[in-house]
Amino acid sequence: MNVSDQKLVLPGQFDNVTKCRIRRDPRGFVTTLLGIEADEFEVIETEQLSMKTHLADSFIRVTTGSEQAIVHCEFQTHDSRDVPMPFRMAGYIGSAIEFYRLPIYSHVVYLHPSAGRTDPGLYVQEVSGYNIGIQYRVLRLAEMDGQALLDTNRVGLVPFAALMKPPASLEAPEWIRHCVQAIEAGTEDESQQKETLVDLAILGGLAHDSQTIRDIISEEIVQESSIIQYFTEKALEQGIEQGIEQGKKQHAVEAILTVLEVRFQTDVAEKLKPFLGAIDDLQRLDQLHRVAARASNIDEFTQALLNLEN
């Protein structure tokens, strides 16, 4: 498996967990986590839709009385980097409106504690005669009351509670242990219990120390489940990402030095290598590469480098 394949596989762990939790208890997810009251709930398998959707999208058809609507939920581990979230959500919501022709209740649920802080929950286009406004709800699990979720006795949702705000009296390890106990006490089926604990470990690993989670969940369950495989792959992914970033940085530095040596034929360029190597920001290195290509002399480049450092 090459690096790009590895990076494509691993995010699926979170997609699988969130979708599994919704399939097991769509009523609880919609009414308890999202706060939407309805009578009937039908999970829609997005892979079967002809509309273009992201793999993490979840759609649930709900019915209240004679009225139907679509509850749309986009799970995000981190902030959307390539395309701002309002643009993505505008695309999802527009496609869903066209496809279902029903009211769309759209949400973004941010899993990581630092994610979603700047998401406005709104896409706006203000052009005279062509104004567009698309609103969606933003939920950050880190800001939600974890104990309130446990008090609902919706055991299938407890893995989400691991990322929520614990009671003030509980530190992180005690909160994870509290969530584990809620799963063990509320699940009679052994296989379902183990599956829920695995999901808790995977989601909880976004905010808590993985070793702490493994210490709290019984060793037998850890050994029999996919938790060890997941955390091993997670460590591998982090190593791969670090290697990729390091490789990009090294390539950028070498490209700058090559331009300087070719243009100015001086050994000063090599003396600048330690200074360039101390820069971790690839965008700054790219800017210096452009300066190296345009500078009139080596002194002009050196001055630009010093200005960036300051």
Image (cartoon, grey):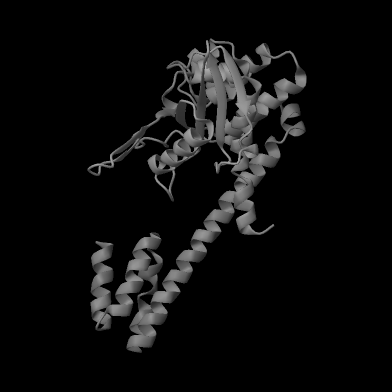
Q: Quadrant of residue 205?
A: top right
Count of marks overlaid on the render? 0
Q: In the picture, which quadrant includes the C terminus? A: bottom left
Residue 146 in the image: state x and y as whole percent: 49, 19
Q: Is residue 9 left or right of residue 308?
A: right
Instruction: Decide if residue 174 is in sight here.
Output: no
In the displayed structure, would residue 290 be above or below residue 220?
below
Which is more toward the observer, 212 or 291?
A: 291
Residue at 50% from the left image edge and 62% from the top image edge: 246
Residue 209 in the image: state x and y as whole percent: 55, 34
Residue at 45% from the left image edge and 16% from the top image edge: 167
In the displayed structure, would residue 107 be above or below residue 127?
above
Residue at 25% from the left image edge and 84% from the top image edge: 297
Which is more toward the observer, 293 or 307?
A: 293
Residue 243 in the image: state x and y as whole percent: 55, 59
Residue 128 in the image: state x and y as whole percent: 22, 43
Residue at 38% from the left image edge and 85% from the top image edge: 261
Instruction: Decide if residue 200 is in sight here.
Output: yes
In the displayed structure, would residue 235 be above or below residue 99?
below
Which is more toward the observer, 232 or 72?
A: 72
